[in-house]
Image (tube, grey):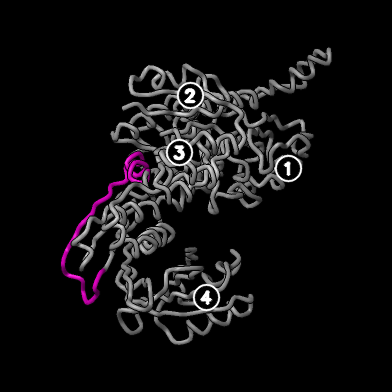
Amino acid sequence: MTYKILVSDPLSDDGIQSLLQADDVEVVKKVGLSEEELIALIPDFDALLVRSQTQVTVDVIRKATNLKVVGRAGVGVDNIDLTAATEQGVIVINAPDGNTISTAEHTMSMLLSLARRIPQAYHRLKQHVWDRKAFVGVELSSKTLGIVGLGRIGSEVAKRAKAFNLSIVAYDPYLTPEKADKLGIQCGTLDEVLRAADFITVHTPLIKETKHIINREAFAKMKDGVHILNCARGGIIDEEALYEAIIDKKVAGAGLDVFEEEPATHHKLLELPEVIATPHLGASTKEAQQNVAIDVSREVLHILRDEPFKNAVNLPSVPAHIINKVQPYFSLSEQLGSFLAQLAVGAHEEIDIKYTGELTDFDVAPLTRNVVKGILSYHLGHQVNYVNAPHLAKQRDLTVNEQKTSSSKGFTNLITVELRTNQETRKISGTLLNGYGARIVKVDEYSVDVTPSGHTLYIHHQDKPGVIGRVGTLLAEHGVNIATMQVGRKDIGGDAIMMLTIDKPVLPKVLEHLGELNEIMTVTEIDL
């Protein structure tokens, strides 16, 4: 059988060599197609390879009657309608690893240029001015590099930075002391990284938890004269706060490859002599562009030949009879994982998932993927999907255990998830109640009855008179409306929890005030 593959964006022949050399593949390259032209062509093709130019819309996918896979030679898939692809059974894959080395090397280039003020000196020399005194830099040797986010790229930066005799302290929610020892670096909290580092580079995804993670409060904790780098995503650093920190001489220099809004040709940060910048060039090397094409071509071949594959970004193929039985638990399983990820403190090490009741009669692998996705997504954002969640967990040395038992403790079906970190173990159980929908029925050893949705305040407190009233009064004073409340306790007067569903997120200062109330031990805001 011969598979037809359409390449609709510029990809080098070197990058798609595996496709061109395959005996069972016919490659057609047509670049610059309009949507109408693509719709006319697509019914004849089994696979479509794109970069960022081609828009794979719902209309294109609906006309793609033979299409099995769309391959994106890059990381983002914003130009592909994932919902339409999933509904039509079309697998969408990307190439998240191809630009790792390129971005790590660009970070090191920015670090060296920032330390020695190379761009500023070059610019002055181009103006025919020989000025050695104005561009005295700093050495990297014996300094401390703080890395916020130690995934693929952050780890590669750490390897290269060690060659410059930099001490490295890193923060990542999945970094354990054991893993840090293997890498020859120090594991720290975010605050410890901010306080210790002479240079700070960020390599996290941009999600709710990391947006403006480097803000005014973060700058206040840093050393005077710190240097800042961002070759990851615009928005991780609060650009207004960075501008103020440079003006105030808190930050001696900043190297930026990304901005919150791009193109950023008129950004006021570019007016500061302490700032060096590039126009989002982290992945712009010949090798990176070739590597992503190689990676995605290889995966497309695997899919067409019905071989194992990875890096899919939409739902895996699951038999219909299994989907019908477990689909009602899809959202619940992911919410249980997300809840635990937001509640647990420390680097994640192991996930135990127990299924009880009638669920044990079915293949629950899709639910396990959802649990893992819910846990990982809290820190990794949209780069986690139903297909790659187990792969990403394995990359982070996160063990996933699945268990079935017929004993359901009074429930028709029950899903219990236990998350062990290097500091604690937390557990949650959930079920579907006939006519009422999803419910969280237990958190650790406390029995509750809570709908897993929206915004929830999880408050650990002592079971003493007046505590609940003081919490309600404080929230009312800050305009926070309580929708529902559940209280769980084991012994009268002992430890207890209250779970309040609220209409909107609360400000950090409100959480701080709640934590200062008598008998309150911890306050955590959970967003589902």
Residue situated furthest right in the rendering: 128
N-term mark: 2 or 4: 2
Mark 1 neighbour density, 10 Å: few (under 14) some (14–19) many (20 or more) = some
- Element under label 3? loop
Mark 4 neighbour density, 10 Å: few (under 14) some (14–19) many (20 or more) = some
Mark 3 neighbour density, 10 Å: few (under 14) some (14–19) many (20 or more) = many
56 above or below 124?
below
104 above or below 451?
above
The answer to which of 425 and 92 lies nearer the viewer is: 92
Residue underneath mark 2: 28
- Element under label 4? loop
Q: Which residues are magenta?
A: 388-413
- How many marks do you count on the picture? 4
Residue underneath mark 3: 150
Image mark for residue 517: 4
* Residue drawn at the location 55% of the way across and 49% of the way down: 210
